[in-house]
Image (spheres, rainbow, N blue to C red):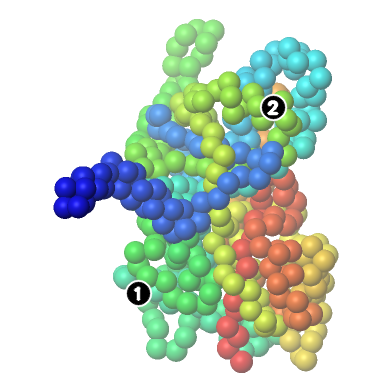
Amino acid sequence: MAKGKGKKQQGTKINYKQQQRQKAKNEQQQMTLKTGVQACADGEINLHIHAIDTWFFRESRPHDAAGASELSSLFPPPIRTLAGALRTYMGDAMGIDWKTLQCPNNTFDFEKSLGNAEHLGELELNGPYIVYQGQRLYPAPLYLMHKEEQCQRLMIGQPVRCDLGTVRLPEMPKGYQGYKTLEQHWLTASGMRLCLDGSVLHAKDIIKAEQLFGHEARLGIARDNATRKVVEGQLYQTRHLRLKDDVHIELNIKNLEAGLLDSVTQTQKRATLRLGGEGRMASLSVSAEAEALPYIKPRKTDTLLIQFITPADFNGNMFPENFNEIKQNGQTVWQGEINGIGLQIEAAVIGKAHREGGWDMQKHQPRPVKSYTPAGTAWFCRLDNPDDYQQVHDTLQGHCIGADSAYGRGQILIGQWQDTD
């Protein structure tokens, strides 16, 4: 009996390799829960864009108007620039003849599937999202202020008389002085969830621009191709971006035609292309999973915070065109509907206009410069019907509003507004 028992004990050897694999699997599951990574829906992919060289996405000022001053770069890249790179990438994957826009697959309709210079056809985009050390970042809300390592939220004050009427304006709580906005700062997903939940986040959740990229100054000349000489007096300076090794850009792409989806995911595992000013190099790769947007559990309340994570286009207006200014109890509010949800905007925190131009590849000329409501803008709203708050979340969370929504403009998150009444 003792001999048999000994053989049984020898047969239960510990499999260290299996334990290590199980440990790695558990750690991956924990990371998935922590980062909220989820599989893309049918017809969707997540595009990863890595910088190989410096990048330059020129601000809206022209070179001649700027004189001898230096032109800086936008960051993250403008969505229309990324959309152009995306269409080139997908067209190449389908074997498109770029002169005739025909491909070996005669059933493929280029304009229907990939659009043209003015629209995206059936495509829909969300992003761009900055990814830092494997997690997505989101623009810091404009109501969030900081002083050294301390953060504080703007509160909505009592109605005051101003050029907009009798409105409620954002203000710092009493006793807090010397705080500044968080322009060119981004938040981790956990930090954004705290903001949406009405809390003040931790300093570790705030990512500064210098953690994401550095600047490199460049000096250029204008050249007369006929004489092969420098044009006198036409020097220009630009400031390129050098992204850190652990930073890249992601773009969610929806409504891909089946043949196009197969070509992109199977024929090109990794591709390079020219991106932005001076055609600097970037690499593209595709994945079938993406990080979910920050989300808080819906609660029954009659107030709502709408937070923008991409620039929005309301055709030059402060709010969507279907919103009307009305008087209610002596206070000026803006009443309307978003995706069928009736609400009143009582206050807003809106920053400086975000301006984009771009280059029309087909016409070989600059696109008109346009102003957008900047990312980080927040509206403080009161619901007409607060009974079904779950439906409000499902209808608004992560959706895009305003013009050019197919480009991902005006993507919103839903949060809690802790009214100061």
Q: Residue at x 21, y 48 (%)?
A: 4
Side (left or right) of 125 relative to 235: right
- Location of residue 267 with respect to 300 vertically, above or below: above
Instruction: Give the residue at mark 1.
Output: 150
Q: Residue furthest top?
A: 227
Residue 67 visible in the picture: no
Q: Is residue 180 visible?
A: yes
Q: Residues within 10 Å of mark 1 (few under 14, many from 20)?
A: few
Residue at the image point whose x is 47% and y is 28% from the top: 283
Residue 115 at x, y = what percent? 75, 31
Residue 2 in percent (x, y) is at 16, 52
Which of the image's four quarters has the C terminus? Answer: bottom right
In the figure, 400 relative to 175: above or below? above
Number of labels in the image equals 2
Label 2: few (<14), some (14–19) or many (≥20) C-alpha neighbours in 10 Å: some
Instruction: Say which residue appears at 70% left-offset and 72% top-offset.
Output: 390
Name the secondary structure under disc 1. strand
In this view, 349 is above or below 404: below
Location of residue 254 by image quarter: top right
**N-terminal label among 1 and 2:** 1
The type of residue carrying mark 1 is Gln
* Residue at the disc numbered 2: 260
Q: Position of residue 260 (x, y in %)?
A: 69, 27
Q: Which mark, residue 179?
A: none
Q: Position of residue 391 (x, y in %)?
A: 74, 70
For residue 54, above or below residue 328:
above
